[in-house]
């Protein structure tokens, strides 16, 4: 287990799932001999690491695009990045929840100081 912490504003929505049948169901997984609902701390940390990495990539991307095109506004740059991000998710190339997508863009804006 890592002693790194996940920021409190990082989304912790449980993954969605369903099971057929008329009776109520509880979705669990067997992890290290224990039944777990949702993700483990290590899995949350992995999702956070992926989101933080992507936010840092957007920071570099926006800084580069602004240097290449001074007429580009901060908002236009972030909007274009968000549009491309959403398209990758929609096409199934990337796996990010809507809340994680919002967090990534918020984090990029925060790092950029915009």
Image: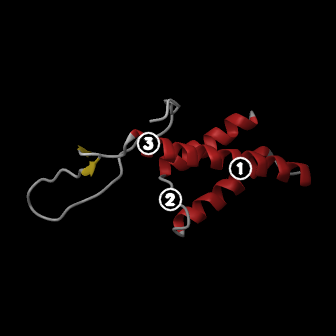
What is the spatial separation of the Cα atoms under label 2 and label 1, in whole angstroms? Answer: 16 Å
Q: Are marks 1 and 3 in contact (CB under 8 Å)?
A: no
Mark 2 / mark 3, whichever is N-terminal: 3
Q: Nearer the viewer, residue 27 or 99?
A: 27
User: Can see residue 69?
Assistant: no
Mark 2 / mark 1, whichever is N-terminal: 1
Viewer-nearest of discs 1 and 3: 3
- Quarter where residue 86 is shown: bottom right
Q: Is residue 92 above or below residue 11?
A: below
Quick one: SS at disc 2?
loop
Name the residue furthest bottom: 91
Place of residue 28 in the rendered image (x, y in percent of width and height, measured from the top left): 24, 50
| Residue under numbered circle 1 | 57
| Callout 1 crowding tier (Cα within 10 Å): few <14, some 14–19, many ≥20 | few
| Residue under numbered circle 3 | 42
What is the spatial separation of the Cα atoms under label 2 and label 3, in whole angstroms? Answer: 17 Å
Quick one: SS at disc 3?
helix
Viewer-nearest of discs 2 and 3: 3
Q: Is residue 114 above or below residue 60?
A: above
Q: Residue at x 9, y 61 (%)?
A: 22
Q: Residue at x 57, y 49 (%)?
A: 50
Q: Residue at x 15, y 53 (%)?
A: 25
| Callout 3 crowding tier (Cα within 10 Å): few <14, some 14–19, many ≥20 | few
- Quarter where residue 17 is shown: bottom left
Work out which quarter of the rendered image holds the C terminus and state it.
top right
Mark 1 / mark 3, whichever is N-terminal: 3
| Residue under numbered circle 2 | 95
């Amino acid at each position: 287990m890592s002693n790194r912490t996940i920021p409190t504003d990082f989304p912790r929505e449980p993954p969605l799932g369903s099971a057929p049948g008329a009776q109520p169901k509880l979705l669990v997984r067997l992890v290290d001999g224990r039944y777990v609902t949702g993700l483990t701390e290590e899995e949350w940390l992995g999702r956070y690491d992926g989101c933080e990495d992507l936010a840092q990539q957007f920071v570099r991307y926006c800084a580069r695009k602004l240097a290449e095109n001074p007429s580009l506004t901060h908002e236009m740059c972030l909007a274009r990045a968000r549009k491309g991000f959403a398209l990758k998710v929609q096409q199934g190339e990337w796996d990010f929840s809507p809340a994680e997508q919002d967090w990534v863009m918020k984090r990029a804006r925060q790092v950029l100081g915009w």
